[in-house]
Image (cartoon, rainbow, N blue to C red):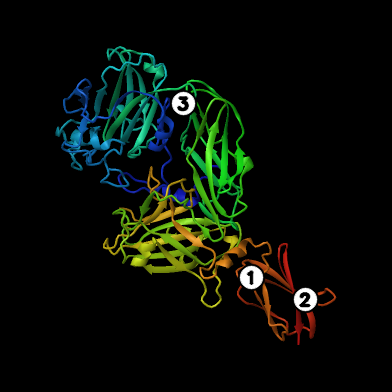
Amino acid sequence: MKKTTLSLIAAALSTAAFAQVSERTVPLPRMVDDAPVRHITPAELSAQYGAETVVWSEDFANGIPATWLNYGTAQSVADPDAKWEYRGAATTPNTTVGSRGAYSGLVTNPNYTSINSATKSNGFVVFDSDYLDNAGTAGNFCAASGIAVLACAPHVANLETSVINLTGYSAADLIFTQFYRRFAGPGGVQSVPATYLDFSTDGGATWFGNVTLNAGIAVNSATAANDVVVVNVGSYIGNAANAKIRFRFDGDYYHWQIDDIQIVSTPKNRLAFTANNGAPAQDIVFGAGQDGARQGHQTLKQARPIAFDANVYNSGILAQNNVKLQMKIFNNTGVVQTINSPVISSVASGDTASWQDLNTYASAWTPSAEGVYGFTYNVMSDSTVVTSDTLALAVTDSTMSLDFGSWDNSIGASTSTYHGDGFQAANRIDLVDDELLFGAKVYLSSNTVPGGILELAVYDSSAFGANGFDPNKLVAYGQKVIDAADVSRTFVRYDFTDATTGRGVELDLADGAYFFNVTQYDNQGANYLAIRNDQTFAKLAGSGYFYLPNAPTAGWYSGYSNSLAFNNLWVRSLYCPASVAAACMLSVDENPMAELALAPNPATDYVNVSFGLLTGQYQIEVLDLTGKVVKSELVRAGANVPVFVGNLDRGMYVVRVAKGTDVKTFKVSLL
């Protein structure tokens, strides 16, 4: 089922969310769009608008233009301090500082309070309601104390553009980058945000529109620091020769930062991938029930059905007819499969076709051979096509991991004051068959310094609860002091192979899934330590957790709000012994019973069945030469499984070993 709900443990953790510190919730979904507003990422901006004509723009490289108006009120009285501020390379403070308020920091990183726009380095603007009310001192609430620090909240702050001539542009999009943290809107009401757009077609004499922004952001939460806002403004100021736009902050506290404003003409035919009501622009789902962890690396033995979906927005002027999602899957030989979603007859201008319609659930693809597979999302109509960048999925004989090979950031003991020694991060690997685990590789950040300690523990899926992992359900463990060789090769390897039998740790399908949990110690910051993280697709709910030892409330969390900084770790589990590469092929051999061996022969009291790298339960039967079963046992595969035959008459027998339809027989002489 798509967009699976959280497991009980994740739901329990989410109740402990709190303001201004790390939150016990999965990363919040993308904000719900406020029609006619969309929120997109910088990458989506480039893909959707890179080829369009820019009609008008302002990036604040030279400050707030002198032709703009900047004014406001504090506690409903005009106040010269209640206005937008400019941050530039030479201003004090400069572009490294956004809000200076005592409570404006992101909960994930209190020191990161400035916008992250494309041209941040040459300037941006901020309305800093929090700072105006407390001057950066916690507890110094202006309204409560009666001390007018600068300008007491509530505030109304207006930033008006100069006149914009949009003659000839009946359809246009307003685009800008923002960073907003919400507390309360007009009248101190927390159910509404403080951010609005107003429009004028008569040079500012009259205003209308009152478009609400950021209604989907919760109180005490924030947008991404590089959230791109897109508003279709054709119906407001299209073809107007004397158009103006007003950015209006109306409410209490925190901040609103803006940069890189532009108006772009709208073409007749244009489709664009877009996030929609919490669902990502493009998604991938694993398993027949579409509820498996998203594994960018998987063995062929563990291959499962894979389906795709997308959301697409009609950002053109005309309706788009016969819209469908088409997935192209290819390897080094070319396209191996093309999969189509059902066709949507028409998508009106300004409407979104959602993943509920644009999906390949009815025609999932299951890898049938090893290889690196590329795939693209293609949404097409009768009039236009939009294609995603190529993404990759690795199907091998020996490796499983949630990462898709994209190193997007690193996370570890050294990457936050909330982390530190004892920081833990775990991802879940799902199974569709029994497996032998021989080892794992944990990939390091390039900043890692030798001397830190990295532990890897493997637990079955039932081990995780409100207090972390049950040590009684540990199935494999390794510890390594990171040395220069580890840093040079970029990963730490753990060997779980039994030194005597050569077998790995048996992972049972009955358990369904296993957590790979990495614990990190950076020796109080002396030895920088972090591991790689992949943000290609958001992790499935319940497939990852981390432990924050230094948070104000230490404990297990499922992510940071509005962030994929903890997502799919580069922890690659290995399912063949490194010293015997040929053994990797056992899982896909046409005759999986070929590795079975029986000894001694002739036998007296026992025969031993060796299963090599095979796993699971097998039926062993001993038959006499008439075909009668004289002994039957259900055994678990192992290096040497003994079968007692000392109570049978001497003579010739057949030993039959079976699992499902796979059977192998041996003739045995008892002396």
User: Is disc 3 in contact with disc 2, using a CB cutoff of under 8 Å?
Assistant: no
The earlier-in-sequence mark between 3 and 1 is: 3
Marker disc for residue 315 = 3
**The C terminus, quarter of image:** bottom right
Few, some or many C-alpha atoms within 10 Å of disc 3 (few <14, some 14-19, many ≥20)?
many
- Residue at numbered disc 1: 636
The residue nearer to you, when weighing 97 against 418, is 97
Q: Kindly identify the amino acid type of the residue bearing the numbered disc 2.
A: Val
Query: Quick check: can you spot residue 293?
Result: no
Is 392 positioned to the left or the right of 155 in the image?
A: right
Give the x, y percent position of residue 297.
51, 54
The secondary structure type at the circle numbered 2 is strand
Give the x, y percent position of residue 614.
62, 67
Rendered position, 188 above or below 101: above
The secondary structure type at the circle numbered 3 is loop
Which is closer to the viewer, label 2 or label 1? 2
Q: Residue at x 17, y 25 (%)?
A: 79
Q: Place residue 177 in its image quadrant.
A: top left
The earlier-in-sequence mark between 3 and 2 is: 3
Rendered position, 95 above or below 271: below
Mark pair 2, 1: CA separation: 20 Å
Give the x, y percent position of residue 68.
23, 21
Q: Kindly identify the amino acid type of the residue bearing the numbered disc 3.
A: Ser
The secondary structure type at the circle numbered 1 is strand
- Residue at numbered disc 2: 654
Marker disc for residue 378 = none
